Image (cartoon, grey):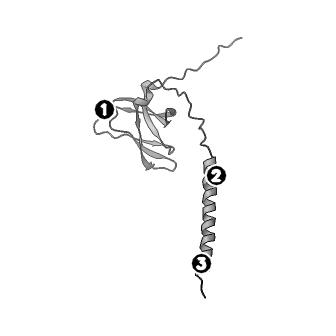
Amino acid sequence: MNRSPLLRRLARCTGGLLAAGLMLTLGACSALQPSEPEQFSSNPPLAAGWQEHTSPLYNLGPGPTAGTTVWMVSALLPRGNYQVISRQGDRARILDGHRFEVDGSVNKEIRLILPFASGSLEAVDERYVVAQAQTTKPKTP
């Protein structure tokens, strides 16, 4: 029995099916447009020039409890108070309640345990965070 023609035909059919499946997958993926996360505003509550005053945080992996991630702060940050932001290009979202202080200690290593594993977290100097002014209407009797 000569099986080589049968194997060639089977290989052609299998290869054609794989190619068709790959084309369908690529077509479906290219049709999807990345959605704009609502939490990233186009006008963040940060002062002009904040982009030059950020420093990336380094992901060290999973934290001590489930659902947490350990991030390390760069030792090159100058003294000051910093807030953690999640950044996408020129847009950023301040992560409420996540802030730290760099006091200038030489041998101090700052690690943050945050309850999520986001992609691009950075530290921004608090001087560039604009306070959200809440407008309250006076009560009328």
Q: Quick check: 86 above or below 1?
A: above
* Direction from residue 48 to residue 17 in the image, left or right: right
- Residue at 60%, 64% in the rendered image: 18
Instruction: Tell me whether circle 2 and circle 3 mark residues in contact (CB < 8 Å).
Output: no
Label 1 – label 3 distance at C-alpha: 71 Å
SS state under label 2: helix
Q: Quick check: 3 above or below 16?
A: below
What is the quadrant of the C terminus in the image? Answer: top right
SS state under label 3: helix
User: Which label's residue is closer to the chain start, 2 or 3?
Assistant: 3
Q: Quick check: 47 above or below 69?
A: above
Residue that extends furthest to the right in the rendered view of this protein? 141
Pointer 3 local density, CA inside 10 Å: few below 14, some 14–19, many at least 20: few
Q: Position of residue 75 (x, y in %)?
A: 33, 38
Instruction: Tell me whether circle 2 and circle 1 mark residues in contact (CB < 8 Å).
Output: no
Label 2 – label 1 distance at C-alpha: 51 Å
Residue beneath disc 3: 7
Residue beneath disc 1: 104
Q: Position of residue 28 (x, y in %)?
A: 64, 52
* Direction from residue 52 to residue 108 in the image, left or right: left
Instruction: Tell me whether circle 1 and circle 3 mark residues in contact (CB < 8 Å).
Output: no
SS state under label 1: loop
Residue that extends furthest to the front in the rendered view of this protein? 5
Mark number, residue 28? 2
User: Which label's residue is closer to the chain start, 2 or 1?
Assistant: 2
